[in-house]
Image (cartoon, rainbow, N blue to C red):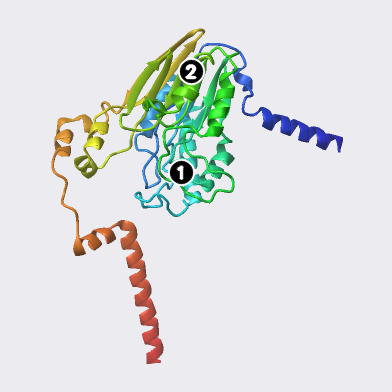
Amino acid sequence: MRLRRLGLSLALTGVLAGRTAAQPDSAVKRPFSFAVLGHIRGDRDHLLNPKLGELLEHVRALHPDFVVLTGDNVWGDLFGGRATERTAALPDTAIVRREWEQLDSALATLHVPVYRVPGNHDISDLGTKRVWWQRYGPLPRVVERYGSRLLLVSSAWIPADNDTVRRIVTRPPALDSAETEWLQAQLGRSQWDHSFVFMHHLIWWDSTASWWKDIHPRLRPGGVRAVFSGDYGPLKFSHLSRDSVLYVQGSMEGIMKLNTLRAIPTSRVLSAQFDNFLFVRVNGPAVSLEVKTLGEWSSPQYEPAFFQATLEPPPPPVTGWRKWVAYLMTPRKLAALGGFALAAFLAGWTLGRQKRR
């Protein structure tokens, strides 16, 4: 019983200290670097972003001490196949788990710790929240590294444990009260050399957001050097410096379909920009940040012919019987129809034989 009580006491101590405990290999102050990757998710096919391999190759070449993901890391079965609904059927958590497993396997090739905050694709209901909590632990969270700290907060909606609602629309640009109070409390502690805040949404784009009243005045006194966001759009990269605190966005996209670029001017504007990620070096009091780009030479989207193709008018919408043909002419649906036709044929053939007997 005494051993069991001791074990329980140690376990509880670990849980309570987990959000702020320094990792054993990072207790000693020294120069270090880290990469910040934003919006690396794939598409509704639930596959990895086709550009992820090139991104990780760039990151490996820099040899960072750790990596931080700033949300929209996986597609997450966000819309249940219907992107225009404000609510939808609950996502298939088995699919979401497979997406995380694929991504984590790819990230493991970096051979460094990876920390993350969620975007609206990563957590959109209680099921996806539980997947996150089980795999990566609850938020908000403090991570201490080499005398500095990372403040990981969720700007994405986090449902309560008894919430059955699904929300798939990005919430207004503000942290909820719990995240705000937690961050305010953390900013009252300044025993670290540097602090860095990570979240998904571009809250700081809105000059009227409560962020500027509730959080920003506490950043510099709390030792915060930079606030990182990873949401995508209306730009892939943006920055703002205020009161010696740097706000910076870095993000990338997947492979955009040509018809989408033809139909949506803002998509053309985004795709014309370089995909990017951020690389930070910390050496004593000095903090430097570099914007790293990818796809400059590997992507055809920067060739004149591709740009000219995006300016062509989009094809007319498919209506009537052609719409149904287009809907059915996919490999999965054709396979299902073929299987149904074969089953019907075999059933009819079997019944015919029985009647002849």
Secondary structure at numbered mark 1: helix
Secondary structure at numbered mark 2: helix
Foreground pick, 210 / 323: 210
Q: Nearer the viewer, mark 1 or mark 2?
A: 2
* 91 in relation to 267, above or below: below
The disc labelled 2 sits on which kind of residue? Pro
Q: Which mark is residue 99?
A: 1
* 62 in relation to 1, above or below: above
**Quadrant (top left/top right/bottom left/bottom right) for the C terminus:** bottom left
User: With 174 as the anchor, is 25 left or right in this view?
Assistant: right
**Residue 313 location (% of width, % of height):** 13, 43
**In percent of the image, x 20 and y 64: which residue is there?**
321
Q: Residues within 10 Å of mark 2 (few under 14, many from 20)?
A: few
**Residue 218 location (% of width, % of height):** 51, 18
Foreground pick, 92 / 126: 126
| Residue 175 visible in rendering | yes
- Would you identify the image quadrant in which residue 4 lies? top right
- Would you identify the image quadrant in which residue 188 lies? top right
Q: Which mark is residue 217?
A: 2
Q: Are marks 1 and 2 in contact (CB under 8 Å)?
A: no
Q: Residue furthest right?
A: 1
**In percent of the image, x 45 and y 18: which residue is there?**
226
